[in-house]
Amino acid sequence: MVLNMKKNKVKAMKSDRTILNIQRTLIYILCVVLVFLSIIPFVIMIVNATRSNIDIQGGLTLIPSKYFFSNYANLTQTFLDKGDIHIFHAFLNSLYVTSFSVSLSVYFGAFVAYGFTAYEFKGKKALFTFVIGVIMVPTQISLVGFYQFVLVLGLTDSYIPLIIPAIATPTTVFFLKQYLAGAYQKDLIDAARIDGCGEFGIFHKIMMPIMKPALATMAILSFVGVWNNYITPNMLIRDNTKYLLPQFIALFSQDFYRTDYGIVYMALTLSVVPLLIMYACLSQYIVRGIALGGVKE
Amino acid sequence: MEIYNEETTKKVAKKINYSKYGYMYIAPFFIVYLLFNLIPLLFTFYLSVSDVRGFTKIGDSSIIGFENYLDIFKMNIFWEALGNTVIIWILNYIPQIGMAFILAKWFTDLRLRIKAAGIFRAFFYMPNIITAATVAMLFFSLFAYPFGPMNQLYGIFGLDPKDFLNDVWIARIIIAFIQFWMWYGQTLILLMAGIMAISPSLYEAAMIDGATSGQMFRKITLPLLKPIMLFILVTSLIGGMQMFDIPWLLTKGGPDYKTRTIMVLIYEQAFGRQGGGQIYNRSAAMSVILFFIVLAMSIGVAYLMKENKTKGKNGAKYEKK
Amino acid sequence: MKKVLVLMIAVMAVLTLSACEKEDTTLNVWLFTDEIKGMIEDYYLVDNPDLPYTIEISITASADFEAKLDPVLDSKDAPDMVALEAAFVSKYVETGYLLPLDDTTDGDNIAQKAVNNGVMPYTLDIGTNADDGVVAMTWQCTPGAFFYRRSMATVTFGSDDPADVQAEVANWDKFQAAATDLKADGYNIISGYGDLTNVFYAGRTAGWQVDGALNLEDSIEDLFILANEIDPYTAQAGQWSDAWFAEMKGNATTFGYFLPTWGLHYVLVPNSRPEDSTETFATDPATSSWGDWGMVQGPQAYSWGGTWIAGLKTTDKPEACKDLIEYITINQEFQNLWVLKTGDFVSNKALVNSIKTQFSMEFLAGQNHYIMFADFAEGIDGSLMTSIDGTVQNKLANELVLYVNSDGSGDDKSYADCIADFKAEVEAALPDLTVA
């Protein structure tokens, strides 16, 4: 009897495990399909960047061809012929704007977050609530007003209105404030004060190093945000030698530029690959940053 | 006594001193925010009741009242654009939250113990870091008519090439799919973080009480995920109502203006290509209306969720009894 | 970190300041292609090496040109000179922001010089407004033609002679009949119905805007019907699409293209050969259509495109603007060199007449395109051009696509629905226009 019961239990466990295994297999299959979905557009893109226009129109394949360099040469040549800029030039423009924005956003984000953490002052709570509140204000709503304001300042076609606003990035402040809530050590600060360290010295010499991991995470996230922004630069930047990369890529939305798909895929590839490489190296920071940003809310 | 007094004055002095530093630290943020966010917002409100359009500059403008708003309420185009935005957002949000939820449940299920969940998740999130402009042009190329890769695939099944982006519903679904494809990874990350933040002791206690994994999911995970679900819903709503890059670059709002989102219309009115733009005042008025729509939606969602939450709590209490 | 930041801000401040300081000694010119840039850099500056100012050229995409120019007009950020495309030249001519060119106060009436030189009158009409007179001028003239494949004409019509082919396509009815004949031999008369619109619009009796109201002529319905009926007889390729270009090559099945002067040199000639062909002209008829083309007027005289140049009233260097405009639009020595280099068709009749006999294009099997373009230019009606053309034609094209519905997905949109939506769109885009 007892033996029989045990046997039944084992059987039940076994069938349980079989169900679990089937379930697991199905989940893996679905996940692989989704991974496929995530990468296949990029695979087609990269492969087509190595094929000639005629081949691309001839059929679909995942086998690269030999037109990579001729596509690259055609890309730069046709754009120069049409009076537009070299994709590398747009890339550098984007790098310029993004590095300034990210530095400002992260530095001043830390600055403000530290101010909110280390000091007591009147209205602190209300001011911080304000910072959190404005995270939820849809930014594109004031696009037209922003444009008219920049027009009054006479700064259209300049990178300044793309860079300076980064000083006030509420999400960065919020995230770093959350981080400091755990990492801030009052004793350390007091000790530094006794050693005669000034208030700004404390921030730069002691707090900045402590915040490094969080700063890195925020730098990556704001890099992605600024690098990918299309609507604001497109609204402000006029001269095509000042185009940022998304603007350059958006040229292909005009038929006039889309005459050779080898060129189109090449340009897309050149704009995507650096991001993919960066992501491959830093994905864990990005994932962590997003997870933290959401949970603390 | 004397010493004590000295100390207090010192403390007071120090405190005043330090609070000064506090203001100095937060000043740059508030100055820049005022300059580049609040002033533009006020400008937008002003523009919406002004006559700034065409060659009229804001310096020589005057207030004309709510004429622009009255114009908009009579414009079918505006309400259609609003409808398009909502349709595309719903088409993207339901599968997005559904897929992310199922995956999050599986990836955090202790019995299933899915391996490499982190790697899968990293792949699912990947499209999100790619420039939306690039994604739009990539999908344009993939769905190009008649020679694009999707049409070549279509051809394998013996079907005639189709101008996918010129079909109202297919175009809307493609845009919704791109949004889904770019964002479900992020939603998954947030949901997983939310689930993993739930204290394991709750599950242990439930297991001792003999709860099944389904019951635990419904009674513990779901109610505790409410805040994060609210966060996801509201951010997605705010983002979705401002959808611009993909419809602007992929379909230019077509075919038949059926993928023209509200943001595309706002942009067109102010900065329209090939003429027809520079209607800054009406564009600003549309922005203001959108602002209040988004605000109302966010508050509404938050209110509904809160209502559900209390219901959930009552339910839990009832269960305990 | 802090030092880096201070440095960054300092660098930015310097960059901004230096950008401001340059203003006084530069002539700012805004262009939308690099064509005029070449004229300035390779000709004007070579002939005028000692200008007391530098010319700063910046290029703005033509689709965004108006959106970027309008807000800065009449402000300190305004350029000194602009190039204006046919699609929007009328708008700026009518605004009153452009520098009068027939002003006699400084004794330099360059508009009069142009007239004396025998400039094509319609180009001046387009650049003239009631208050300021002539404010924009052009060096070119852009009459359009119908280019056809001689080999296909021989098969279908039994002759590749331009006179015979013109007889086959002399009006829209004949054009449609020719489409049927060509289809019987496996040819498409044009690559897509989109090619028709521009030509068709040239046959209207008045422009899109008459006395501040939208002028929608009955003939537009004929255009819709024609486009719909001719669609099966085309290669169903959209204008400027990759398929559209592909149909220009040797092995293609498309009979003809409606293209203007610049279209011949910048579109048809370079695309008639395989992409990897490095020869000046290829002769393999399987891949190259070089030498297989003929040129006729087609059903309707028309013009397409063109670039006008103008100074702005706000400029501090009106003489410099006028000097450059005069050089580009009147200087025959320069124009002669320009024609020889690019094959461009100039608006100066005197020059055209003196050089037109020397051309013979191998590409067109020996036809003299210059003489023909000179003839076709006489048929152009400049008064049809209005300030709202770009927007209106764009909105109409959006409806035409749905009416014709080439790939048959869903239902065709009716003409009444198309026009209702078209009017709503035009009204939304152009608030100052009366739309009945």
Image (cartoon, coloured by chain):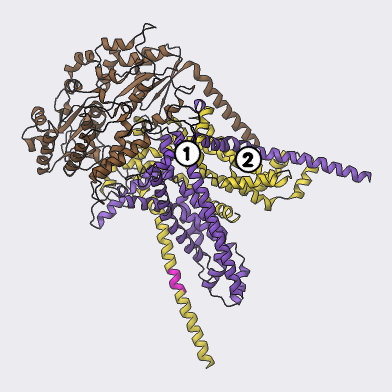
Chain colours: A yellow, B purple, C brown
Q: Determine the residue positioned at 49% across, 21% down.
A: C76
The residue tagged 2 is A108
Tell me how far mark 1 sits from mark 2, CA to CA: 33 Å
Q: Circle 2 sits in a helix, a strand or a loop, which is it?
A: helix
The residue tagged 1 is B285
- Direction from residue C30 to residue B231 in the image, left or right: right
Q: Position of residue C172 (x, y in %)?
A: 14, 34
Kindly identify the amino acid type of the residue bearing the numbered disc 1.
Ala
- Direction from residue A254 to residue C407 in the image, left or right: left
Q: Position of residue C156 (x, y in %)?
A: 8, 38
In the image, residue B120 lies in the stretch drawn in magenta: no
- Disc 1 to disc 2: CB gap under 8 Å: no
Q: Residue furthest bottom?
A: A1
Depth check: give the residue in front, B59 or C134. B59
Q: Position of residue A158 (x, y in %)?
A: 50, 30
Categorize mark 1 by other alpha carbons within 10 Å: few (<14), some (14-19), many (20+): many
**Would you identify the image quadrant in which residue C160 lies?**
top left
- Direction from residue C106 to residue B106 in the image, left or right: right
Residue C84's label in the rendered image is none
**Dominant SS type (magenta):** helix
Q: Residue furthest right?
A: B1
Q: Circle 1 sits in a helix, a strand or a loop, which is it?
A: helix
- Direction from residue B96 to residue B193 in the image, left or right: right
| Bounds of the magenta segment | A20-25
Depth check: give the residue in front, C170 or B310. B310
Q: Position of residue C274 (x, y in %)?
A: 23, 37
Q: Determine the residue positioned at 81% across, 43% down.
A: A194
